[in-house]
Amino acid sequence: MSLTSISFSLLVAILSVFASTFFINPNTSILKYFTDFNVSTFSSHINIVTFASYCSNSHLHKHHKHSDNKGKTVSICDDFPSDFVPPDTNTTSYICVDRNGCCNFTTVQSAVDTVGNFSQKRNIILINTGIYYEKVVVPKSKPNITFQGQGYTSTAIAWNDTANSAHGTFYCGSLQVFSDNFIAKNISFMNLAPIPRPGDVGAQAVAIRISGDQAAFWGCGFFGAQDTLHDDRGRHYFRDCYIQGSIDFIFGNARSLYENCQLISMANPVALGAKVINGAVTAHGRASKDENTGFVFANCSVGGNGRIWLGRAWRPFSRVVFGYSTMSDIIAPEGWNDFNDPARDQTIFYGEYNCLGAGANMSLRTPYAQRLNDTLASYFLNMSFIDADQWLQSDNN
Ligand SMILES: *[C@@H]1O[C@H](CO)[C@@H](O)[C@H](O)[C@H]1NC(C)=O
Ligand SMILES: *[C@@H]1O[C@H](CO)[C@@H](O)[C@H](O)[C@H]1NC(C)=O
Ligand SMILES: *[C@@H]1O[C@H](CO)[C@@H](O)[C@H](O)[C@H]1NC(C)=O
Ligand SMILES: *[C@@H]1O[C@H](CO)[C@@H](O)[C@H](O)[C@H]1NC(C)=O
Ligand SMILES: *[C@@H]1O[C@H](CO)[C@@H](O)[C@H](O)[C@H]1NC(C)=O
Ligand SMILES: *[C@@H]1O[C@H](CO)[C@@H](O)[C@H](O)[C@H]1NC(C)=O
Ligand SMILES: *[C@@H]1O[C@H](CO)[C@@H](O)[C@H](O)[C@H]1NC(C)=O
Ligand SMILES: *[C@@H]1O[C@H](CO)[C@@H](O)[C@H](O)[C@H]1NC(C)=O
Ligand SMILES: *[C@@H]1O[C@H](CO)[C@@H](O)[C@H](O)[C@H]1NC(C)=O
Ligand SMILES: *[C@@H]1O[C@H](CO)[C@@H](O)[C@H](O)[C@H]1NC(C)=O
Ligand SMILES: *[C@@H]1O[C@H](CO)[C@@H](O)[C@H](O)[C@H]1NC(C)=O
Ligand SMILES: *[C@@H]1O[C@H](CO)[C@@H](O)[C@H](O)[C@H]1NC(C)=O
């Protein structure tokens, strides 16, 4: 799956119009967060955008329908597919969320709220195209929930809390998942708070916090700046995901495998040759050698702007591996950082294996970075690292 600029700008356009109409000032510094979108071009997108958020499976070229009707009342739900919500089975139940009120619920939280406690069934929440501007919590008592969106460039849950407004980085996620067996497919999670300026305090803005065990994300987007993805604890799998941020944008103490993901730095561009560092992809928080946690990236790509580290050691036993991944020249030659605590150099585990690109050149790497041998590589770059055979289903279930 690749990020096409066309569908991406559609998402930004939807976001912009939605934001300007309902909730957030179309402040260029907020939107700059997602891309260099030009505010004065919003209005030319409005027709397409409004339609796109009305109708799930219909494609944009159908939008003439609205102008053809001869005085007949046209409901925005007329195009809503009648088979959008499949019938329940013995093992799965389905409910649907649509912003325009065309099916069961208009907010994601209200759908989550109706799922019974400790359900043994899989509860699939179908989320129609659109931006859902709400802060959502999936409590510990609700395992086995799936969020199924219509595509990570067209369906999103967005909010704008910061560490300051939520009284702590851990509470500012637009989505917070505390339950086990959570799955998300083809949907984005965004934090729209303004990008922190250098020196800002409490401006961390998490898009999602994942604190349950056995969570899987297929084709999802994660948008934010500082601390986008709080990969807090448990065993997690991410495949074909797009993850954007600036400082420590994947952080936490989970045991996670990221496959085929794009990791995009939104840090400010840095002049050629300058030594400044303005971001880090990861801040893994393993605190002791007894913790079996770590972030493993397999077949991922790292790109975007700035001059950044692959990781910095949030806690002394921080553990991160990149294998078979491509890194652009935004990666600083030293690669990694010990959080300015040289005592951590003995306990950090930072490994690289068969990576490509200008940023993967290990000749100037910090001494504690390891070029993994085949034995270690096959331990980390492996579904068994997250015990996938015990819980991970293929994505076509
Ligand atoms: C979130 O957006 C709302 C609406 O624009 C604004 O009132 C609020 O201050 C924002 N919160 C933060 C933390 O930026
Ligand atoms: C836009 O955001 C910037 C930085 O957050 C802030 O300084 C400025 O006042 C904002 N402008 C408006 C019109 O809200
Ligand atoms: C935004 O677009 C308008 C119209 O296309 C153009 O005149 C203006 O210069 C653009 N602004 C920026 C900052 O690119
Ligand atoms: C589903 O439940 C019904 C009624 O309890 C039962 O008759 C049917 O065999 C079950 N189907 C499957 C596939 O287990
Ligand atoms: C959801 O909507 C479908 C039809 O659109 C209906 O059959 C089903 O009973 C509704 N479910 C709930 C929980 O409201
Ligand atoms: C579900 O569990 C929560 C927390 O354990 C409890 O507060 C709530 O009352 C339960 N709901 C139902 C319907 O049992
Ligand atoms: C539901 O959750 C429980 C507890 O997390 C788990 O044991 C069970 O396998 C799950 N069922 C399904 C269908 O995912
Ligand atoms: C997700 O979207 C992709 C591309 O739009 C599509 O090929 C895939 O079938 C979707 N998968 C799921 C699980 O929705
Ligand atoms: C690696 O990623 C590329 C591009 O995303 C994909 O085409 C390829 O199939 C992936 N390889 C493996 C082994 O998953
Ligand atoms: C790696 O970096 C070193 C030092 O900058 C340089 O001499 C070498 O040519 C680079 N190797 C490759 C393959 O680019
Ligand atoms: C691989 O590296 C580890 C750690 O450096 C070492 O303990 C192990 O002996 C190595 N294995 C082989 C086959 O070289
Ligand atoms: C993955 O790990 C298992 C169990 O540790 C091992 O048997 C297998 O060879 C590994 N696979 C690869 C491709 O290294």
Image (spheres, helix red, strand yellow):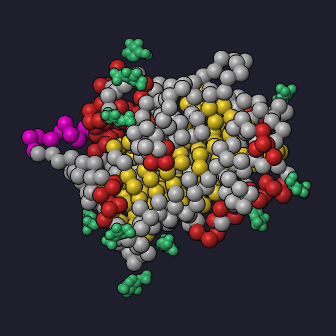
> Does residue 57 show up?
no
Residue 325 found in image quarter? top right
Q: Residue furthest left?
A: 71
> Viewer-proximal residue, 87 or 365?
365
Q: Is residue 39 left or right of residue 384?
A: left
From this view, report whether residue 389 is shown above or below residue 198: below
Q: Quadrant of ligand 11?
A: bottom right
Q: Position of residue 123 (x, y in %)?
A: 40, 67
> Compared with residue 300, is residue 233 higher up or lower down, i.e. above or below?
below
Tell whether 161 sits left or right of 347.
left
Q: Residue at x 50, y 65 (%)?
A: 180
Report the predominant secondary structure element of the magenta stretch: helix
Residue 330: x and y in percent read 67, 29
Q: Who's the residue at 51% across and 35% down the image?
A: 225
Residue at (53%, 45%) from the top-left corner?
A: 229
- Residue 107 horizontal/vertical position (percent): 30, 52
Residue drawn at the location 62% of the way across and 28% of the way down: 278
| Residue 51 in the image: above or below residue 127 | above
> Residues in magenta?
61-72
